[in-house]
Image: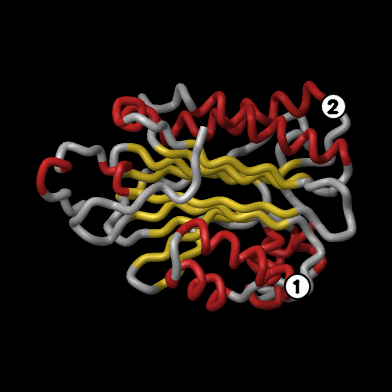
Amino acid sequence: MLVPLSGERHHLVPEARLTTGSFTQGGPDSAYNGDAIAVVRPHDEAHLATQGILAVVCDAMDATEHAERASVLARDTVVRAARDVTRDPHVGLARALASAHAALVSAGSVKGVACTALLVHRGMACCAHVGNTRCYLARSGELYVMTEDHSHAITLVRQGILTFDEARTHPGRLQLTRALGHTDGIEVATWPAPLEVLPGDRFLVCSDGVSDALSHAEIRDIVCSTGAQRACEVLVERARRAGCADNLSAAMISMHAGPTRPPAIDTPLA
């Protein structure tokens, strides 16, 4: 159960106690960033209660100008479609990704875009996912991977051919078995049910550049040790320092752990 706020702030919806952060950086050898991210938080409590907070990370399969446009199209379509999902966020978020898929198919000539979207609404979290972007949950000092990559490497893990550690560096991690815009049909993965958000919870949505370059322990330590915005910046910085030449993106939604008024939002949101 969420801890109620004290004093005159007790009427706030649970999302009012959340802080957010986001950061993206293109690869060092490309003029284009194949990632597109968004963290959308309404500024007033009325819209916050009805719309919640949305984090989206899209990652195109290359870093060309066309891929950059495709990733932006996917992100913007998900953000627009997600405004209408609050009656049934669990189902509606999956439909938002399906809308992005349809938009990419209509645009044509798309190799594929991975996408993970997380919505926190009325104290519950929902996630929809396609490809190898990821959602993590840090809770009580532990880090949980909340999505399963749709990649050839993970297929090999399921078959017992690879371990999860081996899959981190296997070439098959880049061979997606599902991607927005890649085929006529798409199957969007969702959690079995919405998840209750607890005090202290921290959600990370990131592109595979971050999850491939950093170990599980490194991601956990960074996510758990600092504020949402700074954590996103450090994740990207450390992944780049580790030699990752891919696009790098991280977005966080962090639940304030104490019963007092939360700190200011980390980044201004549209």
Vertical placement of residue 210 versus 114, above or below: below
- Along the line of sight, which residue is nearer the eye, 123 or 19? 19
Q: Can residue 248 be seen in this view?
A: yes
Q: Percent from the top left, x then y, of residue 112?
A: 78, 41
Give whichever of discs 2 and 1 has the lower sequence position: 2
Q: In this view, does 162 lie to the left or right of 84?
A: right
| Rendered view: 67 above or below 157 | above
The residue positioned 71% from the left and 66% from the top of the image is 156
User: What kind of element bears circle 1?
Assistant: loop
Spot the residue most to the left. Answer: 7
Q: Which colour scheme is used?
A: secondary structure
Marks 2 and 1: CB-CB under 8 Å?
Answer: no
Q: Which residue lies under the disc numbered 1?
A: 169
Image side of residue 236 versus residue 217, left or right: right
Quadrant of the image occupied by residue 233: bottom right
**Which amino acid, by three-letter code, is at mark 1?**
Thr
Residue situated in front as seen by the camera: 178 or 225: 225
Q: Where is residue 235 in the image (x, y as percent from the top left)?
A: 60, 66
Of 212 and 174, nearer the camera is 212
Give the residue type at disc 2: Gly
Residue 255 position within the rendered picture, expressed as x and y whole percent measured from the top left: 34, 54
Q: How far apart are marks 2 and 1 (CA)?
A: 31 Å
- Give left or right: position of 269 versus 2: right
Q: Mark 2 points at which residue?
A: 108
Which residue is nearer to you in this view: 235 or 129? 235
Q: Which residue corresponds to the image point at 17% horizontal and 49% vertical from the top-left? A: 5
Residue 147's quadrant in the figure?
A: bottom right
